[in-house]
Image (tube, coloured by chain):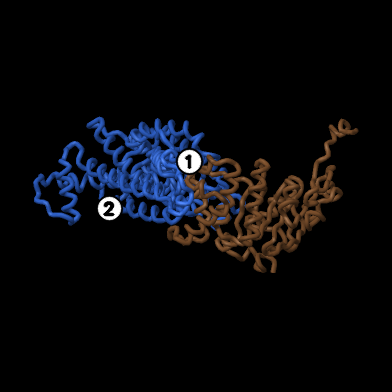
Chain colours: A brown, B blue
């Protein structure tokens, strides 16, 4: 039974249709990337999966159970989310934030127990954030923050991890670090991963399945080598792209085609 | 105030011990803070009870209190009139000040956590306007009715504060949700309307025959509780409100990361938001009925403690209760004794202390807080 299943999902925002009758099924342990142009509804799709938004039509199933019938608390033990925007208005330390990841496991008045502390330690070790424990979150670098947000999600001990643009605003090494971490969690901790991502080359390198959204529906869905063709991408992103093949692993390399400067390059 | 939490927390050399231990440094700080604030509160209460138009030696006050509590049996070395002054006049007022201070401070923590804004306080979202108008109407009808020993003014101020909060909350509900910005704006607007309604009533008071000086002193804030029955009623409300606030501490932590993230953490956000607003309003209303409109306590005390002990609400709430109590007992003592025989409204003192402190913090807040 799939970890997440979307059945004929439609979603409209203020009567403006965003997603139209999308059906998708994500298997347990899968690592999928959702790509598509700005505003196509990648974030919306993730929010429908996490239950923050409710579809106007259709239903979302979590291991066969309708999401609408699962309590917030239970949902938070199954699905963790690393959002695109995360603002911490107060001076929480890194460890305090990771401890907040334990919220769905804590009783109303019960304190943080040994099992919770263990889960926090483990989350911080897996994400290589243990050294940041006493630092104030707002004083961390972009890459450190991103790793800490993943630690918070891991501390929830979920089965599914949803990430929204986890690599944006990071340098190339930090991008790789974050996606290596995510891939490691997927492979070794058996976390099901769905990521919205803009960078097509990172998507090709780190994800075994790529879902292309266009015009409110799924334009293509499959392994990177099949999906990332120049014809398909030009249709999806409504502009010219060039697809090469990497010499080392034969993965597609996607480049934009400059229109302004193209004549200067001609031999 | 001249340091941040970070400078106080040494970075640990060895990350593996840092992750194994449940952060002993901050836990110790918290316990030390609790003991320190409790000590300060006890000291402030003893001083406030001892000092007044008739000074009673602190030693006699402590003996009297311990005797009365049945803890000790000291021989009586003080005149019987002192005992009446202490137990029947000063102690209820001082304890009321402590309760009002605790209520304001805890309410401040609740609203700041909910609105994710360290500059928010219960007054910003309308409670003050409602309470002020309620008090004015109370003077208008000044009639002979009382609830739990409270006259028309505190009783109607209480209802005004609570009623305004319900109104503001309902006004700011959009399609089953209560966006924080809408809540702030609605509260602000309602607050201004009610404030000017009060001003209007005061201006036309020739016809209404209002007791204007009384209303003014009430609007400036001052502990007006003298009877044990009133202290009991406020104590009940404050204990109830604080208990519920502590139960909501974890939700406040989650909500300070944003409503959506709180949902990701399994918090039923709309329900808990309503609960936080209800508890905050209840505490504010209790404080208002015992002390009129005392500004700045709900802003300054939580802010100050957050800088010292960090923003974790499971710790911040008990610290705020003790800190607010100690702060207001001290302010009330100064209000009574600085310019005898005039008793200054305690609001003036909290403003004199709180105002400059607030401005200092405001200048720092660019660094400390992100929006």
* Residue B212, quarter of the rendered image: top left
Subunit of label 2: B
Residue A51 as seen in the image, left or right of residue A255: left
Q: Are marks 2 and 1 in contact (CB under 8 Å)?
A: no
Q: Which residue is mark 1?
A: B118
Vertical position of residue A207 compared to residue A38: above or below? below
Residue at x 72% of width, y 48% of height: A202
Percent across and percent down for residue B1 are 40, 35
> How many other residues sit within 10 Å of disc 2, few (<14), some (14-19) or many (≥20)?
some
Subunit of label 1: B
Q: Compare residues A218 and A234 and report the one nearer the observer.
A: A234
Residue at x 39% of width, y 53% of height: B242
Q: Quadrant of the C terminus of chain A?
A: top right
Residue at x 26% of width, y 36% of height: B336
Report the residue that reaches farthest toward the front: A248
Rounded to the nearest whole Å, what is the CA distance between mark 2 and mark 1? Answer: 35 Å
* Residue A219, quarter of the rendered image: bottom right
Report the residue that reaches farthest toward the right: A267
Q: Compare residues B229 and A209 and report the one nearer the observer.
A: A209
Q: Compare residues A223 and B81 and report the one nearer the observer.
A: A223
Residue A266 as seen in the image, left or right of residue A23: right
Percent across and percent down for residue B334 are 27, 35
Percent across and percent down for residue B58 are 17, 42
Q: Quadrant of the N terminus of chain A?
A: bottom right
Vertical position of residue B269 compared to residue B348: above or below? below
Whether residue A207 can be seen here: yes
Q: Earlier in the sequence, mark 2 or mark 1?
A: 1
Callout 1: SS: loop
Q: Which residue is mark 2?
A: B229
């Amino acid at each position: 039974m799939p970890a997440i299943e979307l059945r004929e999902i439609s979603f409209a925002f203020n009567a403006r249709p965003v997603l139209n009758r999308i059906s998708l099924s994500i298997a347990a342990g899968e690592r999928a990337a959702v790509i598509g142009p700005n505003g196509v509804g990648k974030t919306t799709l993730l929010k429908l999966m996490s239950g923050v938004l409710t579809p106007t039509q259709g239903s979302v199933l979590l291991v066969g159970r309708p999401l609408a019938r699962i309590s917030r608390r239970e949902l938070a033990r199954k699905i963790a989310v690393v959002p695109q925007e995360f603002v911490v208005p107060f001076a929480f330390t890194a460890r305090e934030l990771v401890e907040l990841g334990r919220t769905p496991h804590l009783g109303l008045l019960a304190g943080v127990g040994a099992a919770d502390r263990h889960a926090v330690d483990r989350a911080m070790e897996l994400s290589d954030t243990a050294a940041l424990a006493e630092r104030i979150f707002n004083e961390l670098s972009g890459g450190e923050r991103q790793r800490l947000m993943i630690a918070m999600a891991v501390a929830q001990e979920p089965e599914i991890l949803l990430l929204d643009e986890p690599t944006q605003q990071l340098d190339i090494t930090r991008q790789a670090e974050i996606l290596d971490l995510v891939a490691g969690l997927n492979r070794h901790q058996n976390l099901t991963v769905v990521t919205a991502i803009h960078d097509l080359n990172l998507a090709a390198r780190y994800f075994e399945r790529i879902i292309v959204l266009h015009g409110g529906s799924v334009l293509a869905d499959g392994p990177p080598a099949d999906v990332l063709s120049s014809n398909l991408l030009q249709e999806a992103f409504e502009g010219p792209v060039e697809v090469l093949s990497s010499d080392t692993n034969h993965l597609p390399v996607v480049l934009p085609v400059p229109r302004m400067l193209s004549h200067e390059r001609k031999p | 105030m001249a340091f941040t939490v970070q400078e106080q927390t040494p970075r640990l050399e060895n990350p593996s011990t840092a992750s194994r231990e449940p952060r002993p440094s901050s836990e110790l700080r918290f316990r030390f803070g609790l003991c320190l604030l409790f000590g300060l509160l006890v000291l402030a209460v003893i001083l406030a009870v001892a000092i007044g138009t008739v000074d009673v030696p602190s030693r006699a006050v402590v003996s009297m209190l311990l005797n009365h509590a049945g803890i000790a049996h000291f021989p009586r070395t003080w005149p019987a009139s002192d005992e009446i002054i202490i137990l029947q006049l000063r102690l209820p007022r001082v304890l009321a000040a402590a309760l009002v201070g605790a209520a304001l401070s805890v309410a401040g923590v609740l609203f700041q956590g909910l609105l994710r804004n360290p500059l928010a306080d219960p007054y910003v979202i309308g409670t003050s306007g409602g309470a002020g108008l309620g008090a004015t109407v109370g003077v208008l009808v000044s009639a002979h009715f009382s609830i739990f020993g409270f006259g028309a003014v505190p009783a109607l101020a209480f209802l005004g504060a609570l009623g305004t909060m319900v109104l503001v909350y309902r006004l700011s509900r959009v399609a089953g949700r209560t966006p924080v910005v809408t809540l702030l704006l609605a509260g602000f607007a309602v607050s201004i309307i009610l404030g000017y309604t009060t001003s209007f009533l005061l201006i036309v008071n020739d016809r209404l025959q209002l007791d204007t000086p009384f209303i003014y002193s009430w609007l400036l804030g001052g502990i007006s509780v003298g009877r044990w029955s009133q202290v009991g009623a406020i104590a009940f409300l404050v204990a109830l409100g604080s208990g519920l606030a502590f139960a909501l501490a974890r939700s406040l932590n989650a909500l300070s990361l944003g409503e959506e993230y709180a949902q990701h953490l399994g918090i039923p956000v709309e329900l808990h938001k309503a609960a936080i607003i209800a508890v905050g309003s209840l505490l504010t209303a209790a404080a208002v009925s015992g002390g009129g409109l005392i500004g700045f306590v709900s802003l300054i005390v939580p802010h100050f403690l957050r800088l010292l002990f960090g923003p974790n609400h499971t710790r911040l709430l008990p610290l705020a209760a003790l800190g607010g109590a100690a702060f207001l007992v001290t302010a009330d003592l100064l209000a009574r004794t600085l310019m005898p025989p005039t008793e200054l409204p305690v609001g003036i003192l909290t403003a004199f202390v709180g105002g400059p402190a607030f401005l200092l913090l405001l200048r720092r807040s660019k660094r400390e807080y992100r929006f």
